[in-house]
Image (cartoon, helix red, strand yellow):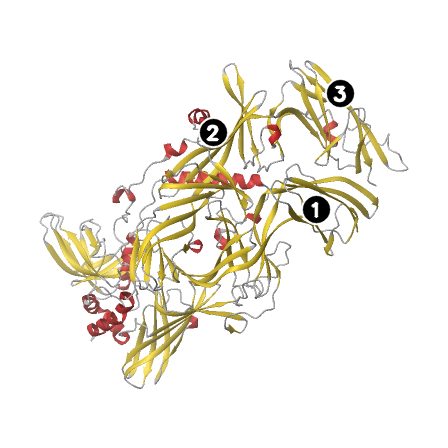
C-alpha cells in the first residue's frame, strides 16, 4: 500500500521536472568588475549559451558567492524570464545530515580488535544540533556515542544542496540558437581607495594611485576593471535590503567618519581572511556518559585548504609606498570618464583580478603643480588672547587650487595625501592629510605639521584674563566694545615665509566685527583673514580691533 | 522521492509506523496556495487527500512550514469532529532518547577491544543526570565510565519525540475513506519585497524600468508547485507597529497620486498573483518580473538643504535626484509596491553601471517620485555666514552667502533649501528671487553656468 503511494507521487512529480531542460553555463566568457568605495562591486558577466526551443532553466555557475540576489539581472536572453532563483542551501556536513532525515544511508562501523569495517543500512531518524539518531535492523541508536569508530556515508547529495550559491533563471520557450546573455549583480567584498603622493619642491609633483582589493574567493580572468569615485546614496544592507554594508548613507555625518568606518571595515575583511577556519559545524551529541563530550574540530577533519594570504595583503601602500612608486608602471594609467555625477576610472588593459588580491594602478600624474606652503593660525575665542593659556603654535599647511592654470585641473577623488620633500639624504616623508572629493575649480588645504621656527605671539593691550569682557572700553550707551589686538609673528628661518591669520567670530559678542586692521582684510569662510610675509630671520606685526555688542 | 521505499519499512520496524498510519500520503499536496505579505508573513493553504478510518485517530501533517504559527491553524474536512490540534516540537536527540527511556529497558552491545567479540545485555535505565546510570543483571553501573565501546540500542522511539516540529490533529471520523482535507495557517519565514532596476538615460530624459518581486523563503521548508499571490500593503499586526507618517524634506515621494492602479485589489491592498505554479525551495530567493516600461519620462535635479546658518571651509556636495511620475502620462501608469530602486547609467562603452539606490514606500499610481541617487562630485556648495546683526531684543539678521560651483560641462540648476527657521522669518534681501516653501522654510533655484559658479546671498531676519 505504502509502496504504491510512493510510485504515484513519483509519477505526479516527474513530468513537471522533465519538460524543462536544465542548461549549465560553467563560467563567463568575459567579465567586467566595477568597484565602488563602499565595499561592493558591480559584476557584469557575458556568457554564451545554446538555447533550445523549449522552456529552459539556465544555471549560472561560478558567480561570486557574496552576490546580492535582489540585484541580479539577466539581460539579452531574447525571451521572457519566468523567474530567477538564487539558492543558497549550502552543502555542509550539518545540512547533509538534516536533509537525510528519513532517508537511507550506510553506516560503517570498524571493529577495534580486527580493524574490519562492517557496513549496515541505516535510516536517519533525527539529526539536529544535539545529535544524530539512526535506525538499523538492530533498533535505534545515537551516532558516535558507542565508542566504536562510526561513520555515515551517503549515496547521493540531496539535489537542493549546493557547494556554491547558485543563480538560475527559468526562460520561456523561444527561438533556439546561440546567444550571449548578460548577467549582472552587485556583490560585497570589494574595496578601493585613492592614495596620493606629493613631492614638494619649487613645484609639486602629484601622483594618484588606485588601490583595489578583491576579498572574495572568486578570481576574475581577463577582466575589465573600473572603479567609481563619488558618494552614492545607499540603503542599509542589514535593515533595508540595500547595498550599504556600513549602513545607510543618509545616516552618515562628516565624510571623515565614513572614511574611518570604511578603512576599519577593510581591515576587518583583511583580518577575516587570516583567521583560522571555524570549527566545522557537525551534528554531534550523545546521552550523558561517564566521560566528557568529544568535539570535532577542524583539525580533526583535516586541512580545508585555507590559504594564508597575509603576506600578499600586507604589501600595501603606507610604509612601502616608496618602493611602489619606484616599481610603478607610470605608462599604464587608469583612464577617467564621467559617469552620471561621478568619476569612473578604467584600468588600461584587461587584467586578472585574483581571489583575495590587492592591486595598485596609477590614475593621475601632474608633475608641475603650483602650490603654496604657509603658516596658519586661527583665533576664535577670548582665551586665545590670554597668556596664561597654552601658547598657540602655528600649523604648517599646503594649499592648492585644482585648476588647469596651476598645473592641475582634474577631478580628485578623496583619499590620503602623503607629502614628501627632497633632502640631501633623499626623499623624506613630511606629513599626510586627507583630501575630500575635489572637483575642478576648488581649493584644498592640508595640515603638514606644527611649526618649529615660526612663532606667534599676542601683545594684548586689553585685560582678557577671563572670558568676560573688561568693562573699561565699553560704551555704556551702545554697549558696544572694540578691543585692540596686537599680534607679532617671528620667523627663525633663513627664508621668508607666508603667514595666514584667521579671526573667527567670538561668541562673547553680538554683531561681531573686525575693524581698523593694519593690513588689508579679507574674508575666508566667514572668518576675517590676513596674509602677509614674514621676512627671513625677522618678524611682522598685525594690529586690528575686534568687538561688537556686549550681550545684556 | 529519489530514495527507495525501503526506509519506510525501516521506520515501521522502528515503531514509527503507528504515528504515520493515518497520515499516509499526507506529505503530498493536491493543491498548495501561498498568500505572501510584505512583512515576513504568509497565509499557507494545503489541500491534501487523507485516508481515514472511522473513530478516533490522529492525522499528522508533514511538510508544513517549520515557522508555522500554531495558534492560527485551521483544519477542515467533512464528516469528522476535530478533537484537538497539536504542534509538537520536542526534538528527538540522543539525550532525550535516553531520558525518555528512564524506567524502561535498553540493550547494551559491548565489543571486546581485544577479541572483537560482541556481547549483548539488557539494561534498565535509572537516571540520566550527569551520566547514565543503569541496572544490569542486578548490578548498578554508569554507562561507559570504563570508556570501552558500548552501543546502546533502543527498540522504540517515543512517539512525541520528533525529527522535525510536527503538526497533528486528533479527529473523530464518522466515515471511512479518502477525502481532501484543507489545512490553513499563518507562518513566518516567507516574505517578499519589490526590487526595481532603473536605467537612466539622462540625455533623453528617460528611465527604462523593470520591477521584480523578490520572494524569500527562510521558513525551513520548501514549497512545491504552489499557487502564489503576493499582497502589497502594510498590514497592522499586534506585534508590529505601522510606520509613522514621514514628514521629511528629503522624502522620496513628493506628491501622492490619484490614479487607479493596475492590479486586483483586496481591501486597501493590491494583489499580485503569480501566473504559473512555482516551487520555492528553502533558503531560496526567487525573482519574478511584474513591471516593465522602457519609456518613463524622468529628469535629474540637484538639491541641497541647510538647517541653520553657519560657515564651512569644506564645500558640501549637492544631492542628485532623479524625478519621475508613475502616472499613465509619465509612461508607467501603475502603483509601485514598496521596495528598493537601483539606478544605473551607461558608461562610455554603453555598459550599465550602478549609480545609487533609494527606497520607495507603497506608492499609488500618479505619484511624483524623486529618488535620491547620491552626491554630485562636480556640484558643490560652500556656505558662509558673513554677518549676524542683532536688530532688537527679539530679532536678528543673518547674512548668508552660498557659493555654488559647477565643474560640469553643462549648466545646472540647484535647488537650495533653508529649513528649520524660527517662527517669524522674513527675507530682507536676496540676490536671486526665492520662494517660501512653508512656514519655516525657503527655497531658491540657483542657476550655475557650465564650469562656473554662482553666489546666492540673502539676508534673513528671524524674530521670536
Residue under numbered circle 2? A318
Give the left or right position of residue A362, taking residue B121 as reference. Answer: right
Report the Cα–Cα distance between label 2 and label 3. 41 Å
Q: Can you say which quadrant of the picture contains the C terminus of chain A?
A: top right
Which residue is drawn at the image coordinates 33% and 43% (left, top)? A277
Q: Quarter-wise, where is residue A202 in the image?
A: top right
Find residue A541 and name its label: 3
Marker disc for residue B151:
none
Q: Residue at x 67, y 40 (%)?
A: B453
User: In the rendered image of this protein, does residue A214 appear above or below residue A175?
Assistant: above
The relative height of residue B90 versus residue A166 in the rendered view (above or below) is: below
The chain ID associated with circle 1 is B
Q: Position of residue A157 (x, y in %)?
A: 25, 56
Q: Is residue B82 above or below residue A267?
A: below
Instruction: Answer whether labels 3 and 1 touch (C-beta < 8 Å).
Output: no
Classify residue B256 by image quadrant: bottom right
Q: CA distance from mark 3 to mark 1?
A: 36 Å
Chain to which the residue tagged by mark 2 belongs: A
Amino acid at each position: 500500500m505504502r509502496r504504491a503511494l510512493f510510485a504515484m507521487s513519483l509519477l505526479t512529480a516527474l513530468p513537471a521536472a522533465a519538460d524543462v531542460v536544465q542548461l549549465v553555463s560553467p563560467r563567463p566568457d568575459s567579465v567586467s568588475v566595477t568597484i565602488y568605495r563602499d565595499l561592493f562591486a558591480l559584476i557584469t558577466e557575458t556568457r554564451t549559451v545554446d538555447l533550445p526551443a523549449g522552456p529552459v532553466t539556465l544555471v549560472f555557475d561560478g558567480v561570486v558567492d557574496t552576490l546580492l540576489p535582489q540585484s541580479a539581472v539577466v539581460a539579452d536572453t531574447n525571451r521572457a524570464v519566468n523567474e530567477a532563483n538564487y539558492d543558497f542551501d549550502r552543502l555542509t556536513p550539518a545540512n547533509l545530515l538534516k536533509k537525510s532525515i528519513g532517508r537511507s544511508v550506510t553506516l560503517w562501523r570498524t571493529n577495534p580488535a580486527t580493524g574490519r569495517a562492517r557496513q549496515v543500512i541505516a535510516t536517519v531518524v533525527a539529526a539536529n544540533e544535539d545529535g544524530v539518531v539512526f535506525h538499523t535492523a538492530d533498533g535505534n541508536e545515537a551516532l558516535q556515542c558507542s565508542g566504536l569508530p562510526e561513520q555515515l556515508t551517503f549515496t547521493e547529495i540531496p539535489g537542493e544542496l549546493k557547494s556554491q550559491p547558485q543563480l538560475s533563471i527559468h526562460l520561456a520557450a523561444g527561438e533556439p540558437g546561440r546567444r550571449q546573455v548578460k548577467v549582472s549583480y552587485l556583490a560585497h567584498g570589494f574595496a578601493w581607495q585613492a592614495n596620493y603622493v606629493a613631492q614638494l619642491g619649487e613645484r609639486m609633483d602629484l601622483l594618484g594611485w588606485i588601490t583595489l582589493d578583491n576579498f572574495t574567493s572568486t578570481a576574475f580572468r581577463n577582466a575589465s576593471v573600473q572603479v567609481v569615485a563619488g558618494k552614492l546614496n545607499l540603503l542599509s544592507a542589514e535593515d533595508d535590503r540595500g547595498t550599504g554594508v556600513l549602513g545607510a548613507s543618509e545616516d552618515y555625518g562628516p565624510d571623515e567618519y565614513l572614511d574611518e568606518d570604511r578603512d576599519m571595515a577593510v581591515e576587518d575583511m583583511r583580518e577575516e581572511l587570516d583567521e583560522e577556519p571555524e570549527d566545522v559545524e557537525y551534528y554531534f551529541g550523545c546521552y550523558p556518559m561517564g566521560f566528557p563530550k568529544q568535539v570535532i574540530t577542524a583539525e580533526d577533519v583535516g586541512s580545508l585548504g585555507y590559504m594564508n594570504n597575509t603576506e600578499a595583503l600586507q604589501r600595501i601602500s603606507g610604509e612601502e609606498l616608496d618602493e611602489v612608486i619606484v616599481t610603478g608602471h607610470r605608462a599604464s594609467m587608469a583612464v577617467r570618464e564621467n559617469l552620471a555625477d561621478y568619476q569612473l576610472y578604467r584600468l588600461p588593459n584587461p587584467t586578472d583580478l585574483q581571489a583575495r588580491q590587492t592591486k595598485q594602478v596609477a590614475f593621475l600624474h601632474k608633475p608641475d603643480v603650483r602650490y603654496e606652503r604657509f603658516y596658519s593660525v586661527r583665533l576664535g575665542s577670548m582665551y586665545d588672547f590670554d597668556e596664561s593659556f597654552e601658547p598657540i603654535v602655528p600649523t604648517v599647511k599646503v594649499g592648492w587650487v585644482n585648476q588647469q592654470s596651476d598645473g592641475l585641473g582634474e577631478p580628485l577623488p578623496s583619499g590620503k595625501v602623503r607629502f614628501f620633500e627632497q633632502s640631501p639624504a633623499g626623499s623624506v616623508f613630511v606629513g599626510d592629510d586627507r583630501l575630500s572629493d575635489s572637483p575642478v575649480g576648488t581649493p584644498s588645504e592640508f595640515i603638514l605639521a606644527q611649526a618649529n621656527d615660526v612663532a606667534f605671539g599676542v601683545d594684548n593691550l586689553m585685560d582678557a584674563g577671563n572670558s568676560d569682557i573688561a568693562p573699561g572700553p565699553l560704551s555704556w550707551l551702545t554697549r558696544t566694545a572694540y578691543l585692540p589686538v596686537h599680534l607679532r609673528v617671528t620667523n627663525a628661518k633663513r627664508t621668508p615665509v607666508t603667514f595666514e591669520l584667521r579671526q573667527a567670530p567670538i561668541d562673547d559678542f553680538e554683531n561681531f566685527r573686525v575693524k581698523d586692521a593694519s593690513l588689508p582684510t579679507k574674508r575666508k569662510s566667514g572668518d576675517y583673514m590676513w596674509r602677509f610675509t614674514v621676512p627671513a630671520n625677522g618678524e611682522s606685526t598685525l594690529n586690528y580691533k575686534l568687538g561688537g555688542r556686549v550681550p545684556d | 522521492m529519489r530514495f527507495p521505499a525501503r526506509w519506510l519499512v525501516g521506520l515501521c520496524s522502528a515503531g514509527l509506523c503507528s504515528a504515520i498510519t493515518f497520515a499516509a500520503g499526507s506529505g503530498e499536496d493536491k493543491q498548495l496556495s501561498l498568500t505572501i505579505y510584505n512583512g515576513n508573513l504568509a497565509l499557507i493553504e494545503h489541500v491534501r487527500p487523507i485516508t481515514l478510518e472511522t473513530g478516533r485517530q490522529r492525522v499528522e501533517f508533514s511538510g508544513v512550514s517549520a515557522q508555522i504559527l500554531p495558534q492560527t491553524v485551521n483544519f477542515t474536512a467533512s464528516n469528522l469532529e476535530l478533537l484537538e490540534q497539536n504542534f509538537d516540537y520536542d526534538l528527538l536527540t540522543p539525550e532525550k532518547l535516553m531520558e525518555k527511556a528512564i524506567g524502561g529497558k535498553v540493550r547494551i552491545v559491548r565489543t571486546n577491544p581485544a577479541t572483537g567479540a560482541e556481547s549483548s545485555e539488557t539494561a534498565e535505565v535509572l537516571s540520566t543526570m550527569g551520566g547514565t546510570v543503569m541496572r544490569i543483571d542486578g548490578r548498578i553501573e554508569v554507562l561507559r565510565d570504563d570508556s570501552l565501546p558500548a552501543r546502546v540500542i533502543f527498540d522504540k522511539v517515543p512517539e512525541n519525540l520528533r525529527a522535525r516540529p510536527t503538526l497533528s490533529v486528533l479527529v473523530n471520523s464518522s466515515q471511512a475513506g479518502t477525502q481532501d482535507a484543507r489545512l490553513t495557517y499563518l507562518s513566518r519565514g516567507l516574505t517578499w519585497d519589490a526590487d526595481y532596476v532603473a536605467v537612466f538615460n539622462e540625455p533623453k530624459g528617460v528611465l527604462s524600468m523593470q520591477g521584480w518581486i523578490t520572494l524569500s523563503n527562510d521558513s525551513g521548508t520548501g514549497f512545491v508547485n504552489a499557487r502564489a499571490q503576493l499582497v502589497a500593503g502594510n498590514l497592522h499586526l499586534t506585534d508590529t507597529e505601522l510606520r509613522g507618517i514621514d514628514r521629511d524634506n528629503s522624502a522620496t515621494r513628493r506628491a501622492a497620486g490619484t490614479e487607479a492602479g493596475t492590479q486586483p485589489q483586496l481591501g486597501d491592498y493590491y494583489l499580485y498573483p503569480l501566473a504559473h505554479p512555482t516551487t520555492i525551495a528553502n533558503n531560496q530567493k526567487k525573482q519574478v518580473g511584474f513591471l516593465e516600461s522602457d519609456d518613463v519620462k524622468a529628469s535629474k535635479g540637484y538639491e541641497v538643504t541647510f538647517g541653520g546658518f553657519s560657515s564651512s571651509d569644506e564645500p558640501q556636495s549637492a544631492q542628485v535626484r532623479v524625478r519621475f511620475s508613475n502616472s499613465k502620462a509619465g509612461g508607467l501608469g501603475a502603483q509601485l509596491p514598496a521596495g528598493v530602486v537601483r539606478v544605473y547609467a551607461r558608461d562610455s562603452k554603453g555598459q550599465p553601471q550602478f549609480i545609487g539606490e533609494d527606497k520607495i514606500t507603497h506608492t499609488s499610481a500618479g505619484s511624483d517620485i524623486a529618488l535620491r541617487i547620491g552626491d554630485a562630485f562636480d556640484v558643490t556648495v560652500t556656505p558662509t555666514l558673513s554677518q549676524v546683526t542683532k536688530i532688537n531684543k527679539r530679532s536678528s539678521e543673518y547674512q548668508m552667502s552660498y557659493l555654488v560651483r559647477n565643474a560640469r560641462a553643462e549648466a545646472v540648476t540647484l535647488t537650495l533649501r533653508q529649513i528649520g527657521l524660527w517662527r517669524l522669518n522674513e527675507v530682507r534681501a536676496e540676490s536671486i528671487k526665492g520662494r517660501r516653501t512653508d512656514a519655516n522654510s525657503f527655497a531658491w533655484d540657483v542657476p550655475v553656468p557650465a564650469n562656473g559658479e554662482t553666489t546666492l546671498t540673502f539676508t534673513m531676519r528671524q524674530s521670536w
